[in-house]
Amino acid sequence: MISSQLPALQIIVPLLAAPFCVIIRNSRATWLISVLASWVTFGISILLYLDVQTLGVISYEMGNWAPPWGIEYRIDSINVFVLLIVSSIGALVSLYAYPSISVEVDENKHYLFWTSYLLCLTGLLGVTITGDAFNIFVFLEISSLSTYVLIALGKNRHALYAAFRYLILGTIGATFIVIGIGLLYLLTGTLNLYDLSMRLGDMSLTQPQLAALAFLTVGISLKLALFPLHLWLPNAYAFAPSVATCFLAATATKVAIYLLLRFAYDVFGQSQIFSELPLGEVLLILSIAAMFIASTVAIYQQDIKRMFAYSSVAQIGYITLGASFASHTALTSSIVHLFNHAITKGAIFLLLGLVALRIGQPTLKKMSGLGKSMPWTSAGLVICGLSLIGVPGTAGFISKWYLILAVLERGWWWLAFMILASSLLAVIYVWRVVETMYVSDSDSRGDSHMASTTSPTSMTLVAWLFVTSCIFFGFHTSFSVEGASAAAKVLLEYTK
Amino acid sequence: MTLNFPTAFILILGGLILPFFSGSLRKLCLIFIPVIAFVHLLILPTGLHGELQFIGYTLSSVRVDKLSQIFGYVFLIAAFLNAIYAWHSDDVLQQSATFVYAGSAIGAVFAGDLITLFIFWELTAISSVILIWARRTDRAYKSGMRYLITHILSGMLLLIGAIFYSKSQGSIEFTSMSLDQPGVILIFIAFGVKSAFPLLHNWLHDAYPESTEIGTVALSVFSTKLGIYALARGFAGTEILIFIGAVMATFPIFYAVIENDLRRVLTYSLNNQLGFMVVGIGIGTELAINGAVAHAFAHILYKSLLFMSMGAVLFRVGTVNGSDLGGLYKSMPWTAFFCIIGAASISAFPLFSGFVAKSLIMSAALYQDHVLVWLVLLFASAGVFHHAGIKIPFFAFFAHDSGFRCKEAPLNMLIAMSIAATICVGIGCFPNLFYMLLPYPVSYEPYTSSHVLSQLQLLVFSALAFAFLMRTGVYPPELKSVNLDSDWLYRVFLKNLTLKFQQHIFQLYDQACHKLKGGFWGLCKKIHRHHQPTGLLARNWPTSNMVLWVALMLASYLIIYFLQFAV
């Protein structure tokens, strides 16, 4: 029965496709393999999503070893939502990638790109799907290692340095996570997440448990680029090839946020960490700092990819803000923003990939007059910018709306005000781009990008699919909000 | 394919595609778009339609009942008249904006929930300001800006109020509300701005007369009556409205009497007429609501008629200042004739539309024993006759001959005016047909001898007073000046205060300013220093420093957790 093996296939398909790429090496063939593998993966995620809708939690025993001894893949409504985000973006980005990769990566390295792309996809899906703590570490390392390669493939020589820095920090993060998991294993003798949470719930809080929590929080915060541990992110995003940036921005940090939610609400859920420890408060303060400082830094950036990378740090602040207090609306807002930010940032970096084909690394200066030479791409950027700000009618509005509702439920007026104020900062950095594209005179710009060819249709289509979904999910919220709301409900049930 | 979508879309879409046509095709569109919309409105069944799910709320974009229907009809009639009136113009910007404006006003009227209302509410503000700016003068630009700010603010109040309201009520349905919670008060103020409540009214006299001859006609129809509709829907029977309405009905009269710009006189009388409607809504009985709605209906038509006639004068002569005009009946007899019909309607002469509408409100006030309010309204009626009924036609078309010899208004303007005039007289002569449209069943007879007699007495004595004052020279002469009412507060008082403040304590002010500026720039500099690409928060940190951060974070987490745990 193939349908009962879906959880394993979710990982195995991209994992097996990766070595094929190394064997075949032909640029176009490896691309086709990747596209095929990632679309099959996407299909499996959809089937899993439908299964979870009807069956509730799916538990899959790897190799028929019963949990808690064997490895268990455990799929509930929260991680199936993340699986769907990751695999859908993986599938669409792979479709988009070919023309962009041909320009931005050396021909003889294409197969390496696709191999690490598939491995990264495997790792991210693996972290999400597995119910085993050590398995999480393993998949996290798979995704991280392949991410370093993806970043280092950028032609700019800064890319190598950026990848190196991320390598150091990412390794530290992963080490912290494995130390945390090790401590938990020492305490409880189990690695199965479900079992862990049961056993931790029975124990009273002890110092090793707190140490484990601290190591895990810092390790995960590093992976999700929570302020002030975000310093690896701007360079990594700015210098990686456009396709890699888009894929990483839309998925990698989101998976890390999922891990945070999983550990804070599920594994430690019954240990009352929210009532007894200031985890929520610390997260809240760091989130607010991220929202303001990263947005302000973004305002000053000249390099557009770097600017949106900082904006990502700020947007992650909104997500963690929602995660920092245990209420249904807040968690819903957090998870919805996870989704909405994934499509918005995905769309932005896809569009910037199109821009990069014309003018190389997009900087503010080079983008002047782009509104005339690339009207569709510029219009797309404006729409995505509106979604980043959170203008009604776009996806970004929905998440901010729920976030503000959640904050008001607590009666925290000042915080609602701060959320709005930080959105104003987003207005500024988005406006800078809009102004450069449409308003500033294009005399200073050379005619180089006027002469170049039109954008490849496949890329434009995928990019616009993302842009339209930014608007679609601003009106049609049944998938995003209901999915998020169900996930939030599950998380809160664990906490009880 | 269902036809139960908002009628607004037909007009808005029509407005948006209009610029893509040219020549006679565009002119055809001008006529047919409102007609199609009207047909669509006729076949829309009553009830709630066009439901959408939006962030957990059910929006109902179309709510058809008698109250929204009658406003929909009259808005469409007005849009149609406007289209004919603007037939001669080549300014497609104005024609498009008028359709979008009319469309969004109709959308707002049929909105079943506060979010849909908000969206159309803001859309009316944005589309209407284009009509003001279409005059393309500096003055129009500035007053348009003031107008836009006021209306966007009104929309923001509405949105914030709606958020509050939805939090406390758990529903965003736009229905009758009571003024006992902060959200509803905000919504009330938002409606108040649109309906030009006293002290919230300055945008009206400020902006409307600055628009083009076509634009003002459209402006006079939609925004304020949308406010009236919203009040009738949400705040019928709210007692404070009686008081507000009474003030509204009286104070503009004084300004109207001394104002020179005849279109500005009309905006004052517009404000005064809105007062009648607000009183009707405040009384809140079925008869009073009927009266307010009927008055809104009739008022839209005769006010457009008056604005059209003044617009025609502006179009031909180039000015509508009372001091410059006079004797135009020789050149523009038809315009003068239609203007007199409009004036008779607004003054509520028996057999004209104002009479059958206003009587409802007056009677409702009496039946509820608001004698004082009734007297105030009586006084206001006399005032209306004075400034709108007599002053407008008298100074424009009669009085001393100004020597202007121009052509009669263009044919399309005359047609638009004649249709409006016909409806005004029609309503006045066959009130029972008109009453059938009203939200509540009517058993009211306007033409009783006491009604007719008292109204005629009022009018005749009012006319006598005018004649007497003119003869004796007491009547304030038409002077070229700008009248300021409560906008005096910000346009004169505040300005002078600032000037004096600067003069008297100039140095102190300057120093404070300097310090504030220094502080502000200091802050900016600090932000800049830390956030610029080479700043503390944005520079490329060495890897070791980044690792240090990680260690610091871990240490602080551990310390915080252990400390908390020890406690």
Image (cartoon, helix red, strand yellow):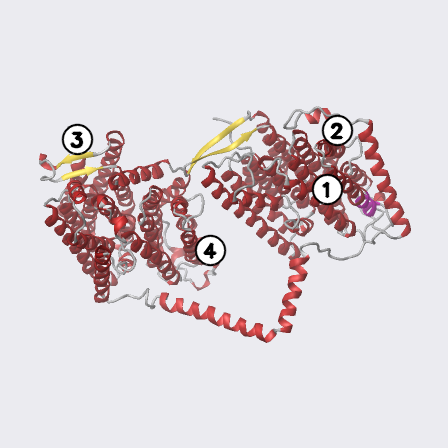
The residue pinned by badge 4 equals: A438
Mark 1 or 4: in front is: 1
Disc ID at residue B426: 2
Query: Which residue is painted at 64% across and 26% down in the image?
Result: B440
Residue B393, magenta (yes or no): yes
**Helix, strand or loop for the magenta stretch, by majority:** helix
Report how far apart the C-alphas of labels 2 and 1 lie in the structure: 19 Å
Q: Which residues are magenta?
A: B390-397
Residue B110 location in percent, x, y?
56, 33
Residue B240 location in percent, x, y?
63, 42
Residue B176, magenta (yes or no): no
A19 above or below B64? below
Same-subunit check for callouts 4 and 3: yes
Do we see residue B25 in this rendering? no
Mark 2 or 1: in front is: 2
Report how far apart the C-alphas of labels 4 and 3 lie in the structure: 54 Å
Circle 1: element type: helix
Q: Residue furthest bottom?
A: B507
Looking at numbered disc 3 in the image, what kind of residue is underneath it? Answer: Ser
Residue B433 location in percent, x, y?
71, 24
Q: Are marks 2 and 4 in contact (CB under 8 Å)?
A: no
Task: Classify the position of the C terminus of chain B by image quarter.
Answer: bottom left
Looking at numbered disc 2 in the image, what kind of residue is underneath it? Answer: Gly
The residue pinned by badge 1 equals: B308
The residue pinned by badge 3 equals: A4
**Going from the N terminus, do you reach mark 4 or mark 3 first?**
3
Q: Are marks 2 and 3 in contact (CB under 8 Å)?
A: no
Q: Which residue is more in the foreground, B481 or B367? A: B367
